[in-house]
């Protein structure tokens, strides 16, 4: 994949932390920042999907609860 140079401002403390990370030392600062950005965007996409799933189930919570109510009444829980 082709890369393009970009200018990014980073405070000194964060830059020191990046430069001391083993991945940045081994592969370079640019590779580290590409990796960090990819992980961040993937995590953000997962959070969005999780929120959408929760919202969808939340809208049907009463319907779903009634579907399993009889099974919950029959559930055998271990005694503690």
Image: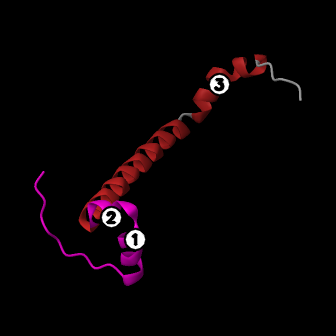
Q: Which residues are magenta?
A: 1-28
Label 2 sits on residue: 24
Image-quadrant location for residue 10? bottom left
Label 3 sits on residue: 66
Label 1 sits on residue: 20
Asked if disc 1 and disc 2 are in contact, CB closer than 8 Å, the reply is: yes
Around disc 1, counting alpha carbons within 10 Å, would you say few (fewer than 14), some (14 to 19), or many (20 or more)? few
Which comes before the other along the chain, label 1 or label 3? 1
Residue positioned 41% across, 44% down in the render: 49
- Looking at this view, name the residue that lies furthest to the front: 26
Q: Secondary structure at mark 2?
A: helix
Is 76 on the left or on the right of 48, as rendered?
A: right
Q: Is residue 21 or residue 78 the one in the foreground?
A: 21
Q: Which mark is residue 52?
A: none
Labels in figure, total: 3
Q: Where in the figure is residue 72, as x and y percent of width and height?
A: 73, 22
């Amino acid at each position: 994949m082709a890369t393009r140079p970009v200018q990014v401002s980073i405070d000194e403390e964060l830059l020191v932390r990046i430069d001391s990370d083993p991945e940045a030392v081994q592969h370079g600062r640019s590779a580290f920042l590409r990796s960090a950005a990819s992980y961040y965007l993937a995590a953000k996409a997962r959070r969005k999907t999780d929120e959408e799933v929760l919202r969808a189930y939340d809208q049907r919570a009463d319907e779903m609860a009634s579907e399993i109510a009889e099974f919950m009444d029959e559930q055998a829980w271990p005694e503690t």
